[in-house]
Image (tube, helix red, strand yellow):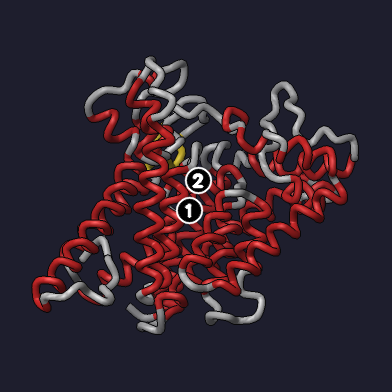
């Protein structure tokens, strides 16, 4: 396929999406989270310390005080302009994130063509559709983080993106220890310094809000939503749905989360130390998704790096395992035309919404419903298990062939 054809495919994909948004379901561009961001900016400008006050009929502001400061420009714009920024901005960020990911993979083939085709396909996955529907900032965070890893090691300003992303939303903070553990100490310390700087800047302007947030609100996941909701594709959500109406033991989820974190971060760090930068970033992001108390499907935009890694491996090797893994991931993540409860018309939606939910329905899942309702979590865990198995198997092969403990092992690619 030529570059011109690839660009035409991307243009058709975006045009189809815009037409569907303009003439399809009114909920395609609901932008509920974008409204929260704008109201957060309004509350900051009001200066009454009510940023985290829960108001009837409104979603609460759950981000850092620094994020509230960052959103203040939205308060000065008419809502129509904010809508355009939310939709168009996320489309641009999808392309930029994909471009950065392919740049990190390395100079293999036509980067423009690869970016165009990948972005065209990812647009029709549920994580991306949900980011667009809610007006979320996940793609902005992905771009900030990837921009750091796209720079040469030790480059000036490397680490700033991670620090800013962590200042806006706590999940990307996992990349600070990741940078340190992978030997990128300068970048890690820069990221930590920027993160602390966002706290200090926010405290200087919003001391009451900082006291509220860092005094305990940031630990209150009930402000974000119900853990059992099928949109929560984390280990915590899966455990809650598995136990149904019976509450799981209080120690179970933390134990599982710590175990997943240990395995995931070990794989991510070892992979990065072998030069597979994007795979390491993707495994680190996957670990964060699995161990977070709440990981909505739109948070799974963080899987973009691993999808690019899979596409690259299929393109280079045509390996059956890699091809099967890519097909499985896209089938789980795809946005299918679907009628959903509490949503008008037909909406591009993921398979997790085919199970009962609402009014406690998600607590009574059985058989295939548990598999489908926890699809993202199961795929994510499968990636970690495959990576761990690949690493152990490779160590054994090297030990058996040399009779010595291996000094260094190849990238534990889950698809190898």
Q: Is residue 53 above or below residue 162?
A: above
Q: Is residue 31 above or below residue 119?
A: above
Q: Nearer the viewer, residue 219 or 46?
A: 219
Tell me which residue sits at (42%, 55%) in the image: 303
Q: Is residue 108 left or right of residue 214?
A: left
Q: Nearer the viewer, residue 415 or 86?
A: 415
Q: Is residue 208 visible?
A: yes
Q: Is residue 242 left or right of residue 237?
A: left
Residue annotated with mark 1: 301
Mark 2 and mark 1 residues within 8 Å of each other at the beta carbon: yes
Tell me which residue sits at (71%, 57%) in the image: 196
User: Residue 36, percent across and down?
Assistant: 70, 39
User: Residue 210, percent across and down?
Assistant: 78, 42
Tell me which residue sits at (39%, 41%) in the image: 350
Q: Nearer the viewer, residue 145 or 269?
A: 269
Dot 1 alpha-carbon crowd within 10 angstroms: few under 14, some 14 to 19, many 20 or more: many
Residue 298's tag is 2
Residue 104's tag is none
Q: Nearer the viewer, residue 261 or 297?
A: 261
Q: Farthest residue in the right direction?
A: 47
Tell me which residue sits at (43%, 17%) in the image: 360
């Amino acid at each position: 396929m030529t570059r011109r054809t690839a660009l035409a495919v991307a243009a058709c994909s975006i045009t189809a999406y815009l037409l569907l948004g303009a003439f399809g379901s009114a909920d395609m561009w609901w932008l509920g989270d974008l409204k929260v961001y704008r109201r957060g900016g309004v509350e900051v400008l009001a200066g009454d310390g009510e940023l985290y006050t829960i108001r009837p009929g409104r979603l609460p502001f759950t981000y850092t005080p620094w994020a509230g400061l960052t959103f203040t420009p939205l308060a000065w714009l008419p809502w129509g302009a904010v809508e355009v920024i939310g939709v168009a901005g996320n489309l641009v960020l999808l392309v930029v994130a994909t471009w950065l990911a392919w740049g990190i993979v390395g100079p293999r083939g036509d980067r423009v063509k690869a970016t165009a085709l990948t972005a065209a396909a990812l647009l029709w996955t549920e994580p991306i559709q949900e980011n667009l529907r809610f007006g979320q900032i996940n793609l902005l965070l992905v771009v900030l983080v990837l921009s750091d890893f796209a720079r040469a090691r030790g480059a000036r300003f490397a680490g700033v993106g991670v620090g800013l992303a962590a200042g806006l939303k706590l999940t990307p903070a996992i990349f600070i220890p990741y940078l340190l553990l992978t030997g990128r100490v300068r970048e890690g310390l820069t990221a930590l310094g920027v993160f602390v700087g966002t706290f200090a800047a926010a405290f200087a302007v919003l001391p009451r809000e900082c006291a509220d947030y860092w005094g305990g609100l940031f630990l209150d996941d009930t402000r974000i939503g119900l853990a059992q909701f099928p949109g929560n594709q984390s280990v915590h959500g899966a455990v809650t749905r598995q136990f149904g109406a019976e509450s799981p033991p209080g120690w179970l989820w933390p134990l599982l989360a710590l175990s997943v974190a240990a395995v995931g971060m070990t794989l991510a760090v070892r992979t990065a130390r072998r030069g597979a930068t994007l795979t390491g970033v993707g495994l680190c992001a996957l670990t964060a998704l699995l161990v977070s108390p709440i990981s909505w499907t739109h948070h799974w935009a963080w899987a973009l790096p691993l999808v690019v890694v899979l596409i690259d491996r299929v393109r280079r090797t045509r390996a059956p395992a890699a091809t099967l893994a890519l097909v499985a991931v896209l089938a789980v993540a795809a946005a299918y035309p679907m009628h959903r409860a509490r949503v008008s018309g037909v909406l591009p939606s993921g398979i997790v919404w085919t199970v009962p939910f609402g009014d406690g329905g998600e607590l009574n899942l059985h058989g295939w419903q548990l598999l489908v309702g926890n699809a993202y979590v199961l795929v994510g865990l499968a990636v970690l298990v495959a990576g761990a198995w690949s690493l152990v198997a490779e160590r054994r092969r090297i030990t058996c062939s040399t009779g010595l403990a291996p000094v260094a092992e190849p990238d534990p690619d889950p698809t190898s």
